Image (tube, rainbow, N blue to C red):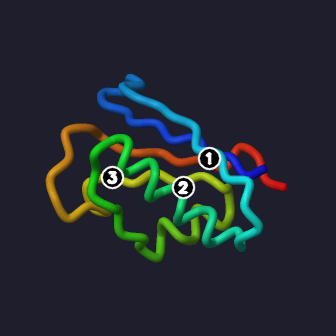
Amino acid sequence: MFRMWAKIFKDTRLLKDTVVCNGSNDTRTHKVFQALDEICYEFDLGKPIWLDATVAEFKKHDKVRFSQDNFIEAIDFDYLEIHVIEED
C-alpha cells in the first residue's frame, strides 16, 4: 500500500490535511502523481509545478513543500506539504 499525507499550512498552523492511499501496481512515480492529483482535487487547487529544487528535496526526503512559486494562480496559504508515509 502506498500512502501520501498532504497538509496545508498558513502562519505555521495546519489548516487542512488528508491521506491518499493507492494499492495499484503502478510505478512509484505514477502513484505520486495520482496522489497529488487527488489531493489537488480534494483541496480545490491547481496542480503545482515541480521545480528542480522540489524534485531534489522529494527524492532526498520523500517530502516536499509547494509554495507560491510552484503555483500559477495565487494561493491563500503559505505552503502545501506532501509526505510519503508508506510504501510497499
**Label 2, on which residue?**
35
Q: How many marks?
A: 3
Seen in the picture, residue 8 relative to 36 is either above or below; the reply is above
For disc 1, the neighbor class at 10 Å (few under 14, some 14 to 19, many from 20) is many
Q: Position of residue 17 (x, y in %)?
A: 47, 31
Q: If you read the primary sequence from the N terminus, does the residue marked by circle 3 or circle 2 appear first?
A: 2
* Placement of the C terminus among the 4 image quadrants: bottom right
Distance from disc 1 to disc 3, alpha carbons, whole Å, reads: 18 Å
For this rendering, which residue is in front, 81 or 41? 41
Seen in the picture, residue 21 relative to 61 is either above or below; the reply is above
Q: Which image quarter: residue 48?
A: bottom left
Distance from disc 2 to disc 1, alpha carbons, whole Å, reads: 7 Å
For this rendering, which residue is in front, 82 or 68? 82
For disc 2, the neighbor class at 10 Å (few under 14, some 14 to 19, many from 20) is many
Q: Residue furthest left?
A: 74
Q: If you read the primary sequence from the N terminus, does the residue marked by circle 1 or circle 3 appear first?
A: 1
**Label 3, on which residue?**
67
For disc 3, the neighbor class at 10 Å (few under 14, some 14 to 19, many from 20) is some
Identity of the amino acid at label 2? Ala
Q: Secondary structure at mark 1?
A: strand
Left or right of 24? Residue 58 is left
**Tag 3 near tag 2, CB within 8 Å:** no
Q: Residue furthest right?
A: 88
Q: Which image quarter: residue 85?
A: top right
